Image: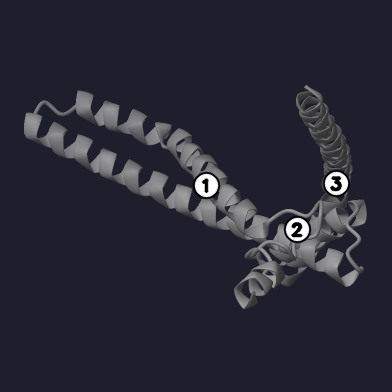
């Protein structure tokens, strides 16, 4: 009995998650890998000029050993640049996503479990302003980045928050319909089983 009572009172690890909010850990992982892909692709496209210089040097170098060394050095430099770009891009986007989703959940909790467009707009504005503040530059440049980031956060996150709320409402409606359909189907199955049992007893 004690074991069954304990099992009944146990809650799943994600039971405290408010409906409609995004898991910041999952979003951070997705943001990290997305940033890695973007950063690596950006550095790979930027290194095209290096490849052109290497090809010019190869054309003017008749020695095979020097050509091999030039190709090896170019490949090593390109690998280092792409790896560094992927890592930096992943860390930046992962941190931004973690801060954005974490602020959404925090604002929803402080507002008594209310999650709406204003949480998304506020989280986006604060996150963009914070990242604009930590960018390198003078104090005037950072103040400009904070103002621009807060405005862009509101402009970009308002339609995103509206779309997110519509998707949550749609998912809730579909979930309610499926639950009602399952309950109706279950009741019909029980009634059919009872009727079959009564027919056998009458025989």
Q: Which residue is mark 1?
A: 33
Q: Nearer the viewer, residue 123 or 10?
A: 10
Mark 3 and mark 1 lie on one chain; the one further toward the N terminus is 1
Q: Which mark is residue 190?
A: none
* Label 3 residue SS: helix
Which mark is first along the chain, 1 or 2? 1
The quarter in which the N terminus is drawn is bottom right
In this view, the residue farthest toward the bottom is 2
Left or right placement of residue 134 versus residue 63 in this view? right
Q: Position of residue 198 (x, y in %)?
A: 82, 29
List x then y, in percent, for residue 174: 84, 35
Give the quarter of the image for residue 181: top right
Q: Compare residues 32 and 172 and report the one nearer the observer.
A: 172
Mark 2 surroundings: few (<14), some (14-19) or many (≥20) residues within 10 A: many
**What is the image's colouring?**
one colour
Can residue 92 be seen here? The reply is yes
The residue wearing badge 3 is: 161
Q: Residue furthest front?
A: 203
Q: Label 2 vs label 1: CA separation? A: 20 Å
Q: Camera-side residue: 147 or 176? A: 176
Q: In the displayed structure, would residue 21 be above or below residue 10?
A: above
| CA–CA distance in space, label 3 to label 1 | 23 Å
For the residues bearing labels 3 and 1, Cβ distance under 8 angstroms: no
- Where residue 102 sits in the image (x, y, percent)? 72, 63
Quarter of the image where one finds residue 12: bottom right
**What residue is at 56 percent from the left and 44 percent from the top?**
34
The quadrant of the rendering that contains the C terminus is top right
Q: Which residue is mark 2?
A: 128
* Position of residue 33 measured from the top left corner of the image (x, y, whole percent): 52, 47
Instruction: Look at 46% across and 53% down and name the residue there.
Output: 87
Query: Is 60 located above or below residue 4 in the figure?
Result: above
């Amino acid at each position: 009995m004690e074991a069954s009572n304990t099992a009944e009172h146990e809650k799943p690890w994600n039971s405290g998650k408010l409906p409609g909010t995004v898991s910041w850990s999952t979003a951070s992982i997705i943001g990290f890998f997305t940033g890695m892909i973007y950063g690596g692709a950006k550095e790979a496209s930027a290194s095209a000029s290096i490849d052109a210089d290497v090809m010019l040097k190869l054309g003017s170098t008749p020695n095979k050993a020097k050509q091999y060394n030039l190709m090896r050095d170019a490949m090593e430099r390109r690998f280092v640049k792409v790896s560094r770009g992927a890592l930096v891009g992943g860390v930046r986007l992962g941190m931004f996503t973690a801060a954005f989703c974490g602020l959404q959940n925090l604002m929803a909790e402080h507002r008594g479990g209310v999650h709406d467009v204003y949480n998304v707009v506020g989280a986006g504005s604060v996150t963009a302003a914070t990242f604009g503040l930590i960018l390198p530059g003078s104090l005037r440049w950072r103040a400009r980045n904070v103002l621009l980031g807060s405005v862009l956060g509101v402009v970009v996150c308002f339609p995103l928050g509206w779309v997110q709320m519509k998707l949550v409402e749609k998912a809730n409606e579909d979930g309610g319909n499926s639950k009602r359909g399952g309950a109706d189907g279950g009741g019909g199955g029980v009634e059919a089983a009872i009727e079959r049992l009564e027919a056998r007893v009458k025989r």
